[in-house]
Amino acid sequence: MQKISKLKKYVELFNRHISRYLAQNISIKTVIYPVSTSGAVFEFIFNDDDDTTISRSDTRPTVGDVLISIPQSMVKGDIHNFTFSGTSLYLENNRIVVIKGENSSKEWDGNAVIKDIDRIVNSFNGEGR
């Protein structure tokens, strides 16, 4: 997904909907990783520094290329040939990595954002689905 307006809209909706679950002093810094094939990756980094920066990384060829370039321990080994579908969530310390593996509109609409946040909140509550 390289359509910047769609990527930014996802971030806007994500931040708006997750904010109701956060303490008042918590802000979200976001890094958008566009992908030239299907999907995209987002890093949502929680902080108490009032940092609400939204930045965009250079476009990478695949989701796997993004995951190789960021700190993560979810996927190891040679992931260049991995195919991601749907949405994968990786929660670690003060950040959430959202991996969107497809460009289908159902993965990017407002309902998808709400489902993603519901999965995150439920995993924190021990109700992982």
Image: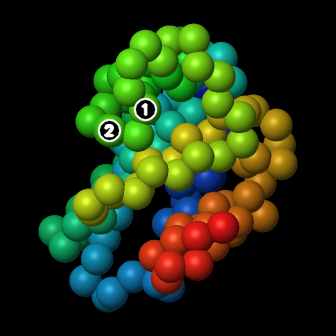
Q: Nearer the viewer, residue 96 or 51?
A: 96
- Write the residue at 39% across / 19% down: 77
For residue 95, above or below residue 56: below
Q: Is label 1 in contact with label 2 (beta carbons under 8 Å)?
A: yes
Q: Quadrant of the N terminus?
A: top right
Indicate the position of residue 80 as horizontal and vertical percent values: 50, 12
- Write the residue at 65% across / 17% down: 37
For residue 78, above or below residue 25: above
User: On the image, numbered disc 2 is attached to which residue?
Assistant: 72
The amino acid sitting under disc 1 is: Val
For residue 55, above or below residue 114: above
Q: Can residue 60 be seen in this view?
A: no
* Res 50 → quadrant: bottom left
Indicate the position of residue 123 as horizontal and vertical percent values: 52, 71
Q: Nearer the viewer, residue 54 or 117?
A: 117
Q: What element carries label 2?
A: loop
* Res 31 → quadrant: top left
User: On the image, numbered disc 1 is attached to which residue?
Assistant: 75
